[in-house]
Amino acid sequence: MPQPALTIVSLIRSPALAESCIQGLKGGRYRLVPLDPADDPVRELEGRREEFDALLLEEGSVDAILFGALQALGLQWPAVVIGPVSGKVLFHDAEVRLPPDQLEQLSYSLDAAVSRFLRRTIRPLPDGWKLPNRLQGRLGYLGVYYKRDPSRFLRNLPAGERSDLLGSLTRTYRDLLISYFKDPAAANQAIESFVNTAFFADLPITRTVEIHMVLIEEIRKQLMLKGQKNDFLQDYRLALLDVMAHLCEMYRRSVPPDLPVVSGALPESHSPSTSPLP
């Protein structure tokens, strides 16, 4: 059964970025409704609250007054923030951050934003605000965790899209390596971004390890050319272990509570793929 369409409010100031988002979601189950950040988006969001399922925000397109006004009204949605990995939280702690050079992951980030919103208690919502119940009723007990779309699994993508997605994931992983020891908050955002896409795209574990090893080898070669020591690179195994731990937690939460786990194994449809891609 196909998943229901989601209506996404887009608050993006840059025309080029707005067009990239439209192209990135083209042909999928998302309907973008653009709102001009220069107008009065709070009035539109309040008046049309039941029409919208999630927000897509460009960092810097709106100021903090918007978020304060929405919170004062008790209005919160699943949110994807397009902006650099910085560790900052703009709207609420269930938002998903996606750098603008990684838009190949946008649809996966939106799925992750809905799931995070449904499984986290953000704050009490007013009686008239039924979004969590509406989303949960449409998407299932655990939201889109339980209903990943196999057509968007990495192995089922056309070759060009598969290559683009792997390139985007590599850039995400590079972000987390750069910040892993010097900026834990930013590194955690990068880990969450990578793991979200890895889960919803059913990225093979072997590919995750391969991405890690390729990037570490690139760094090692750069250090050798500069005559610098590289023995500390072995410490970055902690980053890979961290990613794997987060990914295992995603799979653990994807199993419905009423579905028994036999012999410690996940059902095939929920298990991470371990075989390499052709």
Image (spheres, grey):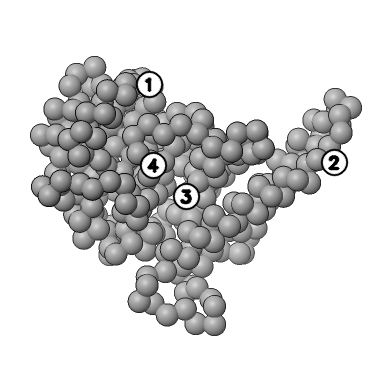
Looking at the picture, tell me which residue is in the foreground, 161 or 43: 43
Q: Secondary structure at mark 2?
A: helix
The numbered dot on residue 60 is: 1
The amino acid type found where label 1 is placed reads Gly
Tag 4 or tag 3, which sits nearer the N-term? 4
Q: CA distance from mark 1 to mark 4?
A: 18 Å
Question: In the image, 52: left or right of 240?
Answer: left
Q: Nearer the viewer, mark 1 or mark 4?
A: 4
Res. 147 visible in picture:
no
For disc 2, the neighbor class at 10 Å (few under 14, some 14 to 19, many from 20) is: few
The numbered dot on residue 196 is: 3
Instruction: Please identify the quarter of the rendering in which residue 76 is found.
Output: top left
For disc 3, the neighbor class at 10 Å (few under 14, some 14 to 19, many from 20) is: many
Q: Residue at x 35, y 76 (%)?
A: 258
Q: Residue at x 48, y 59 (%)?
A: 250
Q: Count of labels shown?
A: 4
Q: Are marks 1 and 3 in contact (CB under 8 Å)?
A: no
The amino acid type found where label 2 is placed reads Asp
Q: Nearer the viewer, mark 2 or mark 3?
A: 2
* Rendering coords of residue 272 (x, y %): 54, 63
- Quarter in which the N terminus is drawn: bottom left
Question: In the image, 31: left or right of 205?
Answer: left
The residue beneath circle 4 is: 93
Q: Residue at x 20, y 33 (%)?
A: 72
The residue beneath circle 2 is: 231
Looking at the picture, tell me which residue is in the foreground, 260 or 202: 260
Outermost residue on the bottom side: it is 263
Q: Secondary structure at mark 3?
A: helix
Outermost residue on the right side: it is 227
* Rendering coords of residue 170 (x, y %): 60, 41
Q: Secondary structure at mark 4?
A: loop
Tag 2 or tag 4, which sits nearer the N-term? 4
